[in-house]
Image (spheres, grey):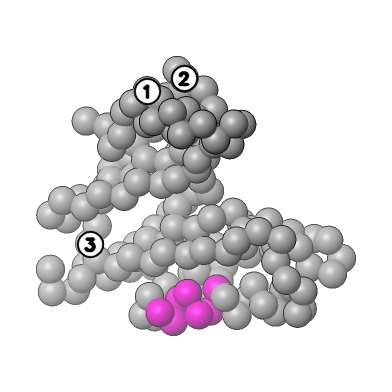
């Protein structure tokens, strides 16, 4: 089963008459201890596996909705153990430029996430936001920077 039907979603976006605009999104679904992801034009998800103390990158193929009528979208599913943590983000942080016009980069995002993944979701997002502010050195970002951190409950 797929998380969304690309043809139906693309038709809905086209009916909005947005011109050449498209919609990038990630769909996340949980059932019991299974975690399902599908993405349309979004950066990779990062999943911290607490037991192994490692960050797994989940890159899914899929163009933004509304861009291609016959586009296909990957779906990824996995078990989540208690304490495992998922980071969803827009491309604003990895593409954030410093004064020398160097992007923050996905490797740096992964590093900050790995360093804080055992913290609360609020602390993780605060650490990512602080790293962004330090990198930009007071300059305003040229794109949105949005995070969503989800953790599998210890007592689930």
Q: What segment carries the magenta color?
A: 122-128
Disc 1: which residue: 7
The structure residue drawn at horizontal position 40% and vertical position 25%, both measured from the top left corner, is: 11
For the N terminus, the quadrant is: top left
* CB atoms of marks 2 and 1 within 8 Å: yes
Depth check: give the residue in front, 36 or 15: 15
Q: Give the distance between the C-alpha atoms of the residues marked 2 and 1, in whole angstroms.
A: 6 Å
Of the two numbered discs 2 and 3 in the rendering, the one whose residue sits closer to the viewer: 2
Label 1 – label 3 distance at C-alpha: 33 Å
The percent position of residue 95, horizontal first and vertical second, equals 68, 56
**Which residue does the numbered mark 3 point to in the structure image?**
81
Closer to the camera in the image, 132 or 46: 132
Kindly give the residue lying farthest to the top in the view shown. Answer: 70
Q: Is mark 2 on a helix, strand or loop?
A: loop
In the picture shown, does residue 145 fall above or below 126? above
Q: Where residue 112 sits: x, y (%)?
A: 55, 71
Q: Which sits earlier in the primary sequence, circle 1 or circle 3? A: 1
Residue under the image location 20 percent in, 71 percent down:
153
> Mark 1 against mark 3, which lies toward the viewer?
1
Horizontal side, residue 10 vs residue 94: left or right:
left
Taking the image as drawn, is residue 89 in sight? yes
In this rendering, position of residue 131 left or right of residue 29: right
User: Which label's residue is closer to the chain start, 2 or 3?
Assistant: 2
- Crowding at dot 2, Cα within 10 Å, few <14 / some 14-19 / many 20+, comes out as some
Q: Position of residue 40 (x, y in %)?
A: 46, 38
Looking at the rendered structure, the secondary structure element under dot 3 is loop
Name the residue: 77% across, 78% down.
Answer: 137
Q: Position of residue 101 (x, y in %)?
A: 83, 61
Point out the tag, 2 or 1, that comes first from the N-terminus: 1
Type of secondary structure dominating the magenta stretch: helix
Viewer can see residue 73: no
Residue named by callout 2: 69
């Amino acid at each position: 089963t797929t998380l969304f039907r690309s043809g139906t979603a693309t038709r809905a976006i086209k009916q909005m008459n947005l011109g050449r605009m498209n919609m990038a999104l990630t769909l996340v679904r949980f059932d019991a201890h299974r975690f399902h992801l599908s993405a349309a034009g979004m950066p990779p998800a990062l999943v911290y596996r607490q037991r192994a103390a490692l960050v797994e990158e989940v890159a899914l193929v899929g163009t933004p909705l509304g861009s291609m009528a016959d586009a296909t979208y990957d779906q990824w599913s996995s078990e989540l153990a208690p304490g495992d943590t998922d980071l969803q983000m827009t491309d604003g942080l990895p593409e954030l430029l410093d004064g020398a016009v160097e992007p923050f980069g996905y490797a740096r995002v992964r590093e900050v996430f790995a360093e804080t993944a055992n913290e609360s979701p609020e602390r993780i997002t605060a650490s990512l936001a602080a790293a962004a502010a330090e990198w930009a050195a007071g300059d305003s970002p040229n794109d949105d920077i949005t995070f969503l951190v989800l953790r599998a409950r210890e007592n689930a």
